[in-house]
Amino acid sequence: MVRHGFDGNALVRITPHNSDTNSDAYRPEQFGSKIILEKLIRRDGSGEYRLRDENSVFLVSKLRKDVEAMKDHLNIQTENPCALLDQDSAKLFLKGDPKDKYKFFLQATELDKILATFSSIDEETRNIAESTLTQEKVKLAALEAAMKEKEKQWQEAQSVGEMESELADMQAQLEWVTVNEKEEQVAKVEKRIAEKKCDANKAATKHAQTKMEVERLESRLSALTILLEESNQRMEKFNDCKAELKSKIRVIRGPLHQKMSEMTQLIESAKRETQHLARLRHALTNKVEMHETLLLKLGSADLQNRLHQIRRELAQTQQSITDAELRINGTSEEAEELEDRHSHCLRLIREAKTDIRNTHRCLSALKNRKTDCLAAYGKNISRLQQLIHAHLDRFFAPPIGPLGMYVTLPKEFMRFAKSIEVAFKGALNNYLVINGQDKKMLDDLKRQACCYQREAEVIIAQRTGSRYQNLNIAAGELGSHAICNILKVENDEVFNALIDVCNAESKLLFDSRETAERSILHGSSGKFQMERFVSEVYLANGDKLLVRGGNLAYIANKAGRRRPIICEDLDSEIKELEKLLDGQQHNLRELCCQESQLRLERDDLHRFVTQEKMRLDKLSHRYHQQYTELQVSEDEFSDLQQEYTLDTTLNAKEAKLEAEMDDPQRDATEISKHIISMKTNEIISQRQAEASQASADQLQQRVSSLRDSCEVQEKIALQACPRPAHILARNAYEKRMNQIQRQRARVHHSLNGLSLSELKNDMELKATKHKAKKANYDKFHQNLLQIQSMLKERKLTWDRLRTAISRRTSIEFSKYMGYNNFVGKLKFRHDQQRLEITVLQNDKGATSASQMIDMKELSGGERSYAQISLLLALGKRSECPFRIMDEFDVFMDAVNRDMTIQLLADAAKNEDKKQFILVTPNSLRYNTLVRIC
């Protein structure tokens, strides 16, 4: 026990037997034949339960609910004063009034629990009847009123159905109005088609007449053409002589070539040739006068030499321009490539500068964190640590924390850092104190340091001074995967806290899910079990595996990404970042040098391209000047050659031919004009006929389309209704439909805008809801009445059971009292909740009836004996496996004490399935029936 001067904790151990040979055993596969129940009581007042197996090795549970479940399974009634009689219950029995004794009777027989259950059920049913049932009744009445209202509206809305029927008929007849309109359109179009066909026939007749007249004129023109051809034959020799001259004139004098070609086609251009010959005669006179002067110029060779020189210079300039363009094109491609390399280099420089800034920022953050090692546990932890050191004398023992400062993860297991922090659930940020006063002091310091609510939480744990031994760790190779065996913990108290709070011995770490399942699981799906002493398994990424109800659960880690506290190596990270920074700066310098070289090359290339372009512009200007000068010289030379090759004999021949061709030419000209006029009329009449025919074809297509549309519309109309005998105009139908719609709108307004179908659906819905609600209400009310009836029946059964138990208890009590020369009687007044105990003492040597006395007239020992007798009598009605009595013989004299012990020993022998435990300060060594513990 906890005593003065002892630093440890109290440990109370109880070992109930758990026979695993029958079905009454409690979880024999876990506990075995014995159940070891431990109660740990710490010096600070806290405590906990521990359930262990028969070998006291495997810790099955620490939960209070498992302890309660064991008590219920084994029927251990710790609240029953008959099963566990302490001093307070004994005083209440000895000194209490009849009402207290009756209450004691109800507790011992557990009738009070049944009565409390009945009272709770009665109160709950009464509340349901007063609240829920009343509310449901009000809702049912509201639904019934709404249903009647809808039925009334339905009766009023019957006229809407007639209106909708008439409106549907109107809409169906309106489809036939559309059919009638389309038929009228077809008739109009057919009438237009007939008119267009008549116009086309007239135009065709006119075209035929015009064509005949054109043919007559063409025959006459052909005769004239024959005459002109004979004249043309005579001119062939003349044309042969003029062939060379015509070729030159065609090149130099374009209009002259055109006029000469028109002479071969006298029908079309006789007039223009005559006018041109007149102009030639006038020009010939002027040219003959200049003949002698031009012959002198023709003999000079300066003009030809000048032309050759200009052509040579022009060819040279053209070659220079071509070479310059080739150089510029090649330079442009090189400039584009150089520009791309320069842009890429600038982009790399910008990225390198960004990386250097990011590295500088990370390096500064790591250096700041190195100066403040507590920053990883929270921004206010440093301030809290300073306050703790300043007020260290106010603590019973110095607080230990944060726990993560004493925990180290080896490098070979660094991949499990995230998993360990997930398994510990923030316990590495906590502090350890030894009692509640230190926790209160540390909470005050946390408020002064402005710590958050979840920051620097406090754990109360006693300081044992040594590390836990004989931990419940999985056997074999699985033990090396336990978190407690992987971590290096410097402080023993921190190690013990992680075992108690986080169960670090039963949580294992694995690299992959397949390895974990193969190592820890056995059984089939739905009956999975983990290996012994294994509660949870964590993977490297923080995911968790555990077994629930025989099924394997896989819980993914969804926590945000952050730097793990347990594996921070700031020095190595700072060295790596400094090395990375040096490499980045060296790369930046190389990129800057490369960029400067590329920029110089780009500028040189740009200057070269600019110079070449300026030279190309000068060459182009020079080429245009030389080309213009060459054209002028060639024109001048060609004019001279043409003018001096003319032969004056052509004038006489041309005059003779003109005289022969005047009369046929005039006739041909008139006929040609007439033919042109007639052909124009022919073309106009032909186009009119074609236009009329095309219009007729278009109208025919439109008629076909209208007929198809009419047939489709007629099918639609037939689906709506048969064709009426008389079809009115569209406006008549629309006027009537508007009247019906206005009438229907007035009715709908009175019906809140609902249509007849919607109103009917709403009415049916209301009726369905009312029917369902009424059925639910009736069923609910019937169930409530049935529950009340069943409760009443069970209360009657409880009354009969209470009467039977009280009768048997009185008989047993009288039997036990007779062992001490008493006749006892229990008077149960159930209506008044009273239990009166009457004892009849037999006077020795008396011959008459014994004298009746009250219990208060008995001595203390006699009253204690009566108490034991009543407890044994009540014990007959209880099935608890234990009977414990604390200081039952304190007020007894020696005679009553011996008789009581003898009575208890006989009762224990008769009830060999129960265990009797008697706690007394007096000695029982002389009694052979009692085993002393």
Image (cartoon, rainbow, N blue to C red):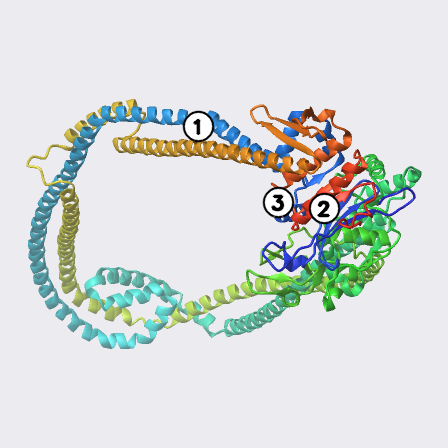
- The part of the image, by quadrant, that contains residue 388 is top right
Q: What type is the residue that disc 1 sits on?
A: Leu
Residue 58 image position (x, y, % from top left): 72, 58
Gap between marks 2 and 1 measured at Cα: 58 Å
Instruction: Between label 2 and label 1, give the one nearer the viewer.
Output: 2
Q: Of the two numbered discs 2 and 3 on the same chain, state the one appearing first in sequence.
A: 3
How crowded is the residue under tag 1: few (<14 C-alpha within 10 Å), some, or many (20+)?
A: some
Q: Secondary structure at mark 2?
A: helix
Q: Of the two numbered discs 2 and 1 on the same chain, state the one appearing first in sequence.
A: 1
Which residue, given by chain and number where applicable, does mark 1 sit on? 133
Do the numbered discs 3 and 1 sit on residues whose CB atoms are within 8 Å?
no
Gap between marks 3 and 1 measured at Cα: 42 Å
Which residue, given by chain and number where applicable, does mark 2 sit on? 905
Gap between marks 2 and 3 measured at Cα: 18 Å
Q: What type is the residue that disc 2 sits on?
A: Ala
Residue nearest the viewer, comparing 351 with 686: 351
Do the numbered discs 2 and 1 sit on residues whose CB atoms are within 8 Å?
no
Residue 241 image position (x, y, % from top left): 29, 77
Which residue, given by chain and number where applicable, does mark 3 sit on? 879
Residue nearest the viewer, comparing 659 with 442: 442
